[in-house]
Image (spheres, rainbow, N blue to C red):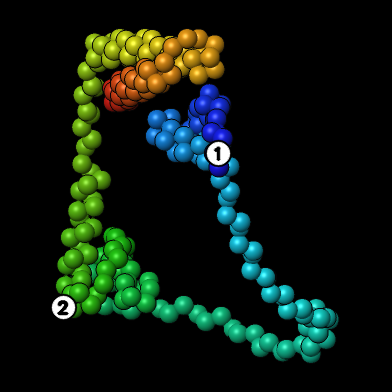
């Protein structure tokens, strides 16, 4: 028994494939040519009436346990007596006597870090000359901590007393900025021209697919892909020129 040949509407299949590829490219922010193969397969499958496998039924969701009168139950509980805790007084710093100096240690944390206040003995009393944060366990004794504290205090004092040397102003980069600006304008002009060529190739291909224009759809598709690739490369060159100009102006600011 002879079977009738199936005739497919190829222009409709091509339009459906193109629409599917464009939607996938827009969602992935990629080129259309990366999704045209999948679009063609999906369009042919839709034309041949391929059935999609039915989705598996969702697993039943167990019912959540119900708590009855929880608020009333908590409100009916007897009050719990709370004994106030008196705040503890901070521990006094540990003091060490040295030749001409006094150090006072205040613990900062449980890791063994201390804040060491260094006092100088003067005829009128003790004068605070600086503070340092140290780990006493790293030193051989209180005298070693004092020597390190005096060294750090003197270093900080010298850094504060060091005069600030004015830095020379950077040389103007007007020539470099003008060159990069002109390059950016050239890249923008090239990108716009290639974009116009790409859109023209796309309109030509769509007209051929819709049979509004005589021509080979495969050749038109190849021309459109080449025009799109040229436009993508021009866009990358424009972005590179823009980044170069931005970097140069940022350094000059």
> In the drawing, does residue 157 fall left or right of residue 113?
left
Nearer to the camera, 217 or 34 = 217
Q: In this figure, which residue is indicated by the disc labeled 1?
A: 3
Q: Where is residue 225 in the image (x, y as percent from the top left)?
A: 37, 22
**21 is higher (above) or lower (below) than 179:** below
The nearer-to-camera label among 1 and 2 is 1
Nearer to the camera, 129 or 60 = 60
Q: In which quarter of the image is residue 78?
A: bottom right
The reply to whether residue 119 is in sight is no
Residue beneath the point at 22% across and 28% down: 167
Instruction: Locate the C terminus by quadrant.
Output: top left
Secondary structure state at the residue bearing disc 1? loop
Q: How many marks?
A: 2
Q: Position of residue 179 (x, y in %)?
A: 26, 11
Q: Could you tell me how far apart the alpha carbons at marks 1 and 2 are, in whole angstroms?
A: 101 Å
Q: Quadrant of residue 184?
A: top left
Residue beneath the point at 43% across and 80% down: 91
Q: In this figure, which residue is indicated by the disc labeled 2?
A: 140
Rendered image: mark on residue 86:
none
Q: Pointer 1: residues within 10 angstroms few (<14), some, or many (20+)?
A: few
Secondary structure state at the residue bearing disc 2? loop
Q: Position of residue 21 (x, y in %)?
A: 48, 33
Residue beneath the point at 37% across and 17% down: 219
> In the drawing, does residue 251 fall left or right of residue 82?
left
Instruction: Locate the N terminus by quadrant.
Output: top right
Mark 1 touches mark 2? (CB < 8 Å): no
Nearer to the camera, 249 or 244 = 244
Q: Which of marks 1 and 2 is nearer the N terminus?
A: 1
Residue beneath the point at 24% across and 75% down: 136
**4 is higher (above) or lower (below) than 185:** below
**253 is higher (above) or lower (below) than 130:** above
């Amino acid at each position: 028994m002879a079977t009738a040949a199936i005739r497919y509407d190829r222009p409709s299949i091509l339009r459906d494939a193109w629409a599917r590829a464009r939607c996938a490219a827009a969602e992935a922010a990629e080129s259309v040519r990366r999704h045209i193969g999948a679009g063609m397969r999906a369009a042919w499958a839709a034309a041949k009436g391929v059935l999609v496998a039915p989705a598996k039924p969702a697993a039943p969701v167990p019912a959540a346990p119900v708590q009855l009168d929880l608020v009333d139950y908590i409100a009916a509980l007897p009050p719990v007596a709370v004994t106030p805790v008196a705040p503890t007084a901070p521990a006094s710093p540990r003091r060490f006597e040295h030749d001409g100096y006094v150090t006072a240690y205040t613990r900062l944390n449980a890791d063994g870090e201390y804040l060491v206040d260094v006092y100088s003995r003067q005829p009128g009393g003790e004068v605070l000359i600086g503070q340092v944060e140290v780990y006493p366990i790293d030193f051989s004794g209180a005298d070693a901590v004092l020597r390190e504290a005096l060294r750090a205090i003197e270093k900080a004092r010298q850094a504060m007393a060091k005069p600030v040397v004015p830095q020379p102003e950077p040389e103007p980069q007007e020539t470099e900025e003008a060159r990069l600006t002109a390059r950016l304008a050239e890249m923008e002009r090239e990108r716009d021209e290639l974009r116009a060529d790409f859109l023209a190739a796309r309109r030509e291909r769509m007209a051929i697919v819709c049979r509004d224009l005589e021509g080979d759809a495969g050749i038109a598709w190849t021309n459109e892909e080449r025009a799109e690739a040229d436009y993508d490369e021009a866009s990358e060159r424009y972005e590179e020129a823009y980044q170069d100009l931005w970097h140069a102006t940022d350094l000059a600011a």
